Amino acid sequence: MNTINKNNSTHSQRKALIEECNPAIEVSNLQFSYTKESPPVIDIKAWQVSQGEHVFLSGPSGSGKSTLLNLLCGTLTPTQGDIALLAQPFSALSNRQRDKFRARNIGVVFQQFNLIPYLSVAQNINAAVYFANTNVGKTAADAKLRDLLDKLQLPSHVLHAKADALSIGQQQRVAIARALINDPQLLIVDEPTSALDTDARDSFMSLLKDVAGESTMIFVSHDKAMESYFDRHCSIKELSLSTNHIKTLGDNVPKAQERA
Amino acid sequence: MLSTIAIESLKRRKATAILTLLSITISISLLLCVDIIRSQVKTSFTRTVSGVDLIVGAPSGQLNLLLSSVFNIGTPTKGIEYKSIAALQSNKQVSWLIPLSLGDTHRGFRVVGTTNSFFDHFKYGDMQSLQLSDGATFTQPLSTVVGADIAESLGYEVGDKIIISHGLGSVSFNNHDDHPFTISGILDKTGTPVDKAVYVTLQGLEEAHTGPKHSPTSMLGRKSADKANEHDHDEHTEEHAAYNSEAFTPESVSVVMLGLKHRVTALQLQYQINQSKKEPLMAILPGMALAELWQIMGNVESLLLGLSGLIVICALIGLATMLLATMRERYQEIAVLRTIGAGPFTLLLLIQIEAMLLTIVSAALSLGLVAGLMSALKPWLSSTYGLFLSSPLFGQSSVTIILLILGCTYLVSLFPAVAAYKRGLHAGLNANS
């Protein structure tokens, strides 16, 4: 309940701020099919997410949530249509430019956390710094890493532990640290709470919201009970069906607020 | 960072990585061994004789003459009559002459009948003269000078008496028991077949076969005697004065080695000897004969080198197979690396770094292994095969081999690297979803 009240008190301020900002994600006429013959898995006429907005994307298994996230990450290429991220024509970028853009601007937390098991925690996180090639000095990167570990309540000794030696909870937090180490403007989170019980899930969400800060966040889950943590709820089914409906924060107020 | 990821990744796949490492190490070692043996044999080969301009024997073929006279291998040719030797000796182009009489053995080692001119004029390697480690050259008709290996393996010392046997078998029932030879000197190690030969006087050898014979004058001694005061073997000058081995006139000898006053006349004299009508003779140029022999052996050597090369290729294909086989379990991690910003070329590089790391470590291990192996086998190779390993063990060809292997590693690792490069990100990320 505390989280919900907190959300209520800050919602109007966030709404005002978010509405002033340019869209972080702009999707138009987006279609994606895995094969030429198969019907499109994703078919969205238009969709926008404002900068700093935290969007909850839900849908049943197999509805195309992960496919949409992969399209937003650039790990899949649209069959048709455009995706603009942070005012950049993301889907029109070359593979190389897209890799660079993703490394510098998008943080991804996977369902399975996808840490590289044979690397230590520090190596897993520093790999993201290395590939982003942001010319951040080692001292600054180390300071940022320690700051993130503090915020994520990870003891410093885990830095040298191999990723596969960590508990699930620790792996989750390391995955968040890796996603946030380069201060991404866009954070994409794919069902990281599916294996957690309610208490652990609430604790994780508080932590995530706290460290995500002003980053735009797309959070995917099939558990609709989590929409209360977000500025807006989008159903993947509705997105695909509502052919030319642009959804913004004002159109979809969290149910928790409506109830309040 | 890439090398850290590559090293950690290999450490994760410890078992397969170690097996691959072993397979590459063994194959590179094999290739290096073949290359070293080849180059060392070639060096050994070319150093067996130097400074001898012509070798003359009965017509039997260039290689047979070379093998029997220089390498003490094979059956000696029919003898050359004394009058022919005398004719060669009196030839104005001839500076010196070494008669060699072959056909006997001592406990499996070849016995060579010769004169002190052998010790004066025979040279090996880079025109190195024979040196005595102990004693002196022939001091009396039944003197013998033994090679370093014989003295070492049979424990001979100066003053010991030895019996020679008729024929070339390692076991002979026809021993010249009544003509024991006394060791007057032991030669320094040369790394040539000289180390495995027993040198006896022509006189002693002939007496062992036919009984005592007296020859007051000899053409063999003429030129050598003229030079007796010129050569630099001071240590046995006194023995020359006491016993002149060149003074003996043999009925015939197996082979004659000639040194010419001017090397340019070698071809001309070779032609003259080969055309001789008095007695059919054959003269060969040792350098050319060695080159022909090496050409024959070179084919075998090329075959061995080729086979070893194929073994290395197989090992490298094994490396590519190992990397390809592990790709399936790595697709997820590759997709993660791509998601956090590693481009396809970076992944290509990562897989190639892993392959290169394995090959570089294998090459380093192979160099150590081969160096250790050669060092351990050095005495055995020299005693059994007469192969003397000289430094440096690894030469230009070893460097070329390793560079070629690294080049091949780069090529074969392209297969798994391209597989990683092409692999869709999406498939990897959702592998476990």
Image: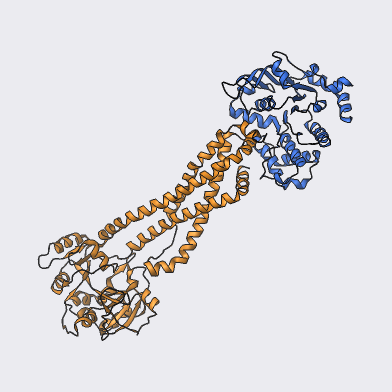
Chain colours: A blue, B orange
Q: Is residue A183 or residue A248 the one in the foreground?
A: A248
> In x, y percent, where is residue B302?
35, 53
Corner quadrant of residue A86: top right
Q: Residue furthest top?
A: A244
Asked if residue B32 lies left or right of residue A41, the reply is left
User: At 71% across and 32% down in the image, what residue appears?
Assistant: A107
> In x, y percent, where is residue B21?
53, 52
Quadrant of the rendering where the C terminus of chain B is positioned:
top right
User: At 60% across and 37% down in the image, what residue appears?
Assistant: B331
Asked if residue A252 lies left or right of residue A134, the reply is right
Q: Is residue B361 visible?
A: no
> In x, y percent, where is residue B156?
37, 81
Q: Is residue A10 visible?
A: yes
Quadrant of the rendering where the N terminus of chain B is positioned:
top right
Vertical order, B226 against B358 (above or below)? below
Vertical order, B418 against A42 (above or below)? below
Asked if residue B353 lies left or right of residue B223, the reply is right
Q: Residue furthest left?
A: B277
> In x, y percent, where is residue B180?
28, 85
Q: Is residue B318 or residue B288 the one in the foreground?
A: B318
Vertical order, B344 against B302 (above or below)? above
Q: Residue furthest bottom?
A: B178
